[in-house]
Amino acid sequence: MTTQPLIVLEGITKHYRMGDEIVQALRGIDLQINPNEYVAIMGPSGSGKSTLMNILGCLDWPTSGRYVLDGVDVSQLDDAALAAIRNRKIGFVFQTFNLLPRATALKNVELPLIYAGVPPQQRRQRAIAALESVGLGDRLRHKPPELSGGQRQRVAIARALVTEPSLILADEPTGNLDSKTGEEIMQLFERIWREGNTVLLVTHEDDIARHARRIIRIRDGRVESDHINPTPHVVEPIEQQQ
Amino acid sequence: MKRWATEYVEVLQSAVESLRANPLRSLLTSLGVMIGVAFVSLMGWALRSLDAAWEATLSSLGSDMLYVDKWNWAGGGNWRLLMNRKNITIDQAEEVARRLQSADMVYISADSWGRTIVHADQRASGVVIEGTMAIFGMLPSTNVAEGRFFTEMEERNATAVAVIGDGIRSTLFGNRSPIGQVIRIEGRPFRIVGVMEKRGTLFTDFLDRMVYIPLPAFFGLYGRYSRSMTIAAKAQSPDQLDALRDELTGIMRAVRKLAPNAENDFSINEAQVFRDQVANIRAVIWGVGIGLTALSFLVGVIGITNVMFVAVVERTKEIGIRRAVGARRSSILVQFLCEAMMLCVAGAVVGVIVCSALVAVLALALRESAAFLLPLLPAEIVLVAVVISIAVGIIAGFVPALRAARLDPVEALRYEA
């Protein structure tokens, strides 16, 4: 049985207009990512990896090329359809956590389900389950300012997981954390991957990228290298707290 | 459909939360709407009270009554001309009453204004002494609260009995019963046999300061020819008023011996004469009210638009987050519209509460002098005020909400305050 690739990128380019100049952020990217891969996209700043992440995350449109996510060509979809794709198929984890500061952890995790139209009771149950799975079952009522950095990122991960998306897209997920906490977050990603999810890390840190099983390097808007990580840094996942 | 419902319930909740996050700012922002709603409510209340006063006037004077008088009640016409009119004498009045055919009831009365009456050591001034007939007591609009009206026998015998108005009762007797007590009018003793119901209105507040005595007794006090008579005639039904007026005019002209080309030297008054006054007051309330209301809502719209623009900038990151987890542009639009609406509704609610309290206090404080004031805001006025405030919210919030909805999610996520 051949598996359908989760992500197919064909000749993706992205041009920006900056004043009079046209910046070519992506100059033709071809990629395939299969379900349940653990991929790191690496590149120095200015390489185009953020642009690529925005396109992969359906936050932005490519200038040209085709992007098929989970069998759907999303490069031609309108804003509302892309919002629906982001809602159902993509779970974002950001460097700066990007939680709503005034909402409780529970409410933050519920947010994607609200836009998915999940009824309140079911929403609550699923959000609680997601928070428990990242070990925050006892922090439901806490607001982000009352949580540590690691806890905030775990809330963000719970929010990414709660819709059971096809793709977890993590942009420098440990960038704002100390190395010990960062390591704990990486354990969490390891576990999430082992549970069958597709995890895509975007980072410029080798320390983070080495956890992934496949490393794609971007430079000057093109894929510089794409190889299987021969020596993944495996952190044994912490057991799920119930 | 259900999906939308789920989303919008949350949108409303989050709108309330973001208002509560900034209570002072919310309060100040919605001040314009608050004041606007207050003006709308007060205007509606004033108009409604005016209508009530008007209704009460109609029923106390009788909407089917005509009053032939030397004076024009509405105050129209040249005052000096009216002054020079000859008094309607009792003989003329009796002649008119005799000849009149289409009236259901006729009576003659005479008034003496600004008298002072005495009971024991109490005095009441500004009293209107009215000499009238026993039939007056039988009119449907004449309601005796305590005791009775004087009888035809008492009228014929010029018995010294009096029926006093509610205002006089409270001045002279407080809470005691005045029945059987004696008051002195022009030094002569009159025995009180009845007290009228309170019937004064905004336009006819003097009604509660009246003392009714038999017409012959009135003549005994003031003489038979010293004052101009009023002839009151009741039509068989309100739509017979015009016929009655025509007949009265004809008889009056004949009795007064007017030349065919001479103007009437009398006025035929009716409760409707107060209608112009009502219309004038109404126009003033509308003019002032609408002006002030429009101004406050304009201020409200500007203030809310301004604050919503600030809110959109402040919450750029939040917008980015919401967009990233699946909010459509329309969701963001609706969210910010809802917030602007909630601001307005909150303002409206405060405005209505403050006004209700104000109106209740006013009505209570002025229950003697302005009984026509309603103690409550009319419900539909409150509804109108809230609907207007929602509309104001949508108008004020639309442009900022559109700006929020159009934010690029990538830019919004990158935004740092």
Image (cartoon, grey):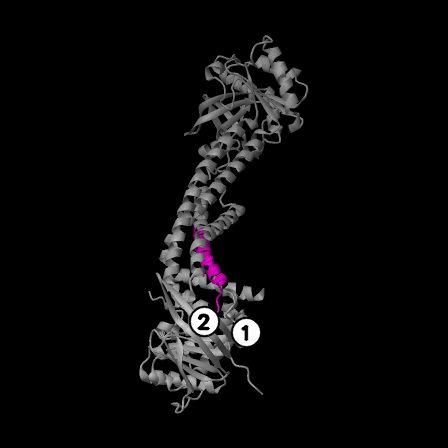
Residue B369 drawn at (x, y percent): 45, 36
Q: What's the magenta region? A: B326-350
Residue B166 drawn at (x, y percent): 50, 33
Q: Is residue B184 above or below residue A67?
A: above
Q: Earlier in the sequence, mark 2 or mark 1?
A: 1
A93 sits left or right of B238 in the view: left
B343 within the magenta span = yes
Q: Which mark is residue B196?
A: none
Q: Amino acid at mark 2?
A: Lys
Q: Amino acid at mark 1?
A: Val
Q: Which mark is residue A107?
A: 2
Residue A61 drawn at (x, y percent): 46, 68
Between A117 and A173, the one nearer to me in the picture: A173
B370 within the magenta span = no
Q: Quadrant of residue B264?
A: top right
At label 1, counting other C-alpha atoms closer than 10 Å, the crowd grade (few under 14, some 14-19, many 20 or more) is some
What predominant SS class does the magenta segment belong to?
helix
Q: Quadrant of the N terminus of chain B?
A: bottom right
Residue B347 drawn at (x, y percent): 43, 52
Between A26 and B35, the one nearer to me in the picture: A26
